[in-house]
Amino acid sequence: MKNSFQPIEENKRTAIVDILRGWALLGVVLGNYSDFFHIGLPTSANDNSSLSHILGAVNEIFFSAKSWTLLTILFGYGFAVLINNVTNKGKNPVFFFSWRMILLFGFAFIDSAFWLGDILKDYAFLGLVLLLFYKSSTKKILITSLLLFLMIPFIAAYINNIKMVYPEISTSSDYLKLYYSGNWFDFFEFNLLASYYEQMIVLGYAITAHIVMFACMLLGFYAQKINFFNRLYELKKQLKTALFISLFTALSLGVFLKIAMANKLTFFTYFNPFYWLILSTMLFIATGICLLYSNNKLKTIFNYFRVSGKMTLTNYMTQNILAAFIFSGIGLNISNSMPYWFYFTLAVSVFVIQLFISKWWLSKYNYGPVEWLWRVLSYRKLFPFKKAEKRNHLVEENSNNDQKKESALETVKHKFS
């Protein structure tokens, strides 16, 4: 397992990117755990308490769909960084990244068996499509991304007008027997069937959501092309402008959509700007975090978010696997029996615990466990896992170099003696 190229070195990682990944992970766990509230037949626990309404509004406004769109932008950014790294080392980026996405499909299958809302499979698929643009110019990438964003309301409206009937696995008493049974194979079957019927073949997800994802990936690709995240200090003025524009856009769209829905306006049949509201809100939040970071605010909090973001894949899969043991029949079988506030506060608690575990873990290890495995399989090379192992490796390498120098020196001395 030998190769001449390596992953991105730790000291070359861009801090704000990991911080944004950490923030996105909070939104992802909130969204995923809140979805468990809707798995199963209606129960009396579907409360109307004020706390649940407030927390539901917080999730809807600040996190719902904003987190996975942000994470998708960062995926596109990471794609560009990785492609540059591989290309600069003289390797074939298409072969390398294709193999890496195949591996991601493997992780996605495992995650989908535990959670019906897995997004890794979408990243793996769209990552392969993104390879078509790896040689494209900065201008072409930006224009393609913007065109897709402009088309989204029309595509969403058209897709929503197509009437198709799909099995509702997560609310069907026949399929829910698999979820509640306590048998591992039944549980895996339930999630894989739900992943297929409620995501993969649903046109609103299979087409509209994937176009949104791909546009976001291209935007992240563009951000890396212009070295955006490493230029935050010099771009403060532009960031402030973007902050106010995105806020104004989000508020305007929010008010407009509320009025339109209240008056049952019919334009939604050909123009649905819902994703524009999501994207403008997401950009407002992300821009705000970038400004806070560039102004050296919230350093302690951002440091914790950063270590969590370094272990995005591990933390994401752990959240979903842990949820399986809490909500389904293979574990505590809580399902949707609790009020909404329970799922929200549980998600926040899991995320906070992961912040501390991530900090502790990375103080002893070079990578998160899933990240390490993905790197080893991607590069087909065994990397030091423990930090101590890395130091010993460097010491051993330096010792070998010293021995080689001494040996060479002795040869020279012997030659001239």
Image (cartoon, helix red, strand yellow):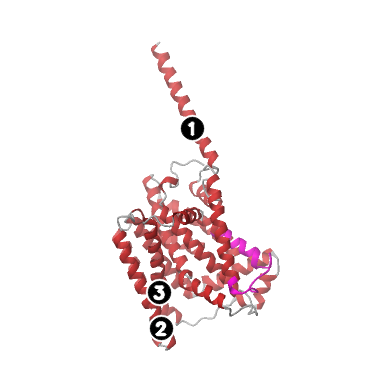
Whichever of labels 1 and 2 marks the residue nearer the N terminus, that label is 2
What residue is shown with label 2? 268
The verdict on residue 127 being magenta is no
**Label 2, residues with CA under 10 Å away: few <14, some 14-19, many ≥20:** many
Task: Give x and y (percent) for residue 66.
Answer: 45, 68
Say the numbered circle drawn on residue 277.
Answer: 3
Residue 264 spot, x, y in % from top left = 43, 88
Mark number, residue 228:
none
Mark 3–mark 2 CB contact (< 8 Å)? no
Q: Residue at x 43, y 43 (%)?
A: 5
Answer whether labels 1 and 3 touch (C-beta < 8 Å): no
Residue type at tag 2: Phe
Q: Is residue 376 above or below residue 327?
A: above
Position of the C terminus, as image quadrant, is top left
Q: Residue at x 49, y 54 (%)?
A: 304
Observer-side mark, 3 or 2, equals 3
Residue indicated by mark 1: 397
Q: Is residue 83 above or below residue 189?
A: above
Compared across the picture, whether 399 is left or right of 186 comes to left
* Other residues around mark 3 within 10 Å, as few (<14) / some (14–19) / many (≥20): many
Seen at 41% across and 80% down, the residue is: 158
The answer to which of 261 and 118 lies nearer the viewer is 261
Residue 164, horizontal then vertical, whole percent: 51, 81
- Numbered range of the magenta stretch: 316-341
Q: What amino acid is found at the position of numbered circle 1 in the picture?
A: Glu
Instruction: Report the Cα–Cα distance between label 3 and label 2.
Output: 14 Å
